[in-house]
Amino acid sequence: MTTVAALLSESGHADAPLLLAHVLERDRSWLIAHGDDRPRECDAQRFRSLLQRRRDGVPVAYLIGSAGFYGRDFLVNQHVLVPRPETEHLVDEALGFITGAMRVLDVGTGCGAIACTIAAVTGATVDATDVSTAALEVAQANARRLRVADRCKFYIGDLARPVAGKRYDVIIANLPYIPSADLPRPPDPASFEPRLALDGGPDGLALYRKLMRDLADLVEPGGIVLLEAAPPTIEELTALLRTALPNFAISVGSDYAGLARYVKASSKRSSGPRTRTRASEATRSHGWRERR
């Protein structure tokens, strides 16, 4: 039987400690303190199997079944996109704006990271939509785990159609925005994520163009709209948003790398954002490569 230290040494992979800690149901500090311990052979084999899948490109979040976002762990699987640290900026903006029991709409919620985080931190009620039933099952599980299911309601359907007729103080969307021709291929970890959550059409903005038709009827006077996209598409997305909401002030925000990452529409009747909440430093280490 091999030891913990030997398993880590033979692996030679940066994610090996995380995977072994997951298999042994321990934290990584335990691995350091118990290097001479001898795991069961079945655990050693499971670790080696996960490690090979990681070498093949499978995202580590899929292998351990969770990913960090804004200081919380979220369940993820092959039916949802792995939350990115870039998306924390949308949450920052929302938290800096929300007061009291505002109404929030998260379009294309995926695993529910945005919706559940906002519900957990504020007194807002959140509606969230997704076209994937499998994704919504994950989002609902996360809402239950974080004890926000009473203020998060999930709807199956295309973009904002399931909530037609409602209005919101905050609308957030992190829709698929990779141009179809640029979709990643193995062994890129992103290639293992659902195409439905990645493919933004010919120029990466196909779904955003559809959403624009409904925004004026969705956002409350004094509300805000926050949309994430790829840096090369931000200029066009800004123009689309300005056309959809001509009476709103439009601004562009950057990600941790200083790249233009999201567009914000603020009603000229709003008082502007309060002090923004900083995302947890611990969260950022869980993020995966930015989408092209």
Image (cartoon, rainbow, N blue to C red):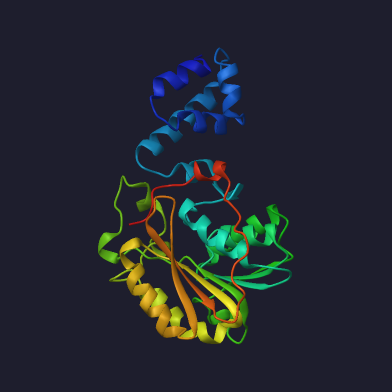
Q: Measured from the top left, where is residue 258 in percent x and y?
A: 39, 53
Q: How many marks?
A: 0
Q: Residue at point 29% right, 70% down?
A: 203
Report the front residue among 133 and 34. 34
Out of 147 and 88, give the one closest to the viewer. Answer: 88
On screen, residue 60 above or below 79? above
Front in this rendered view, residue 158 or 170: 170
Indicate whether 177 appears above or below 208: above
Left or right: residue 211 versus residue 218 is left
* Picture layout, residue 32 above or below residue 172: above
Tell me which residue sits at (59%, 16%) in the image. Answer: 34
On the question of residue 80 being in view, the answer is no
Q: Residue at x 50, y 28 (%)?
A: 17
Q: Could you tell me which quadrant the C terminus lies in?
A: bottom left
Left or right, 117 with respect to 205, comes to right
Residue at the outermost left position: 181
Residue depicted at 61% across the width and 55% down the height? 277
Q: Position of residue 19 (x, y in %)?
A: 50, 33
Q: Position of residue 186 (x, y in %)?
A: 30, 48
- Please say if 187 is above or below 139: above
Q: Position of residue 165 (x, y in %)?
A: 61, 87
Q: Is residue 171 visible?
A: yes
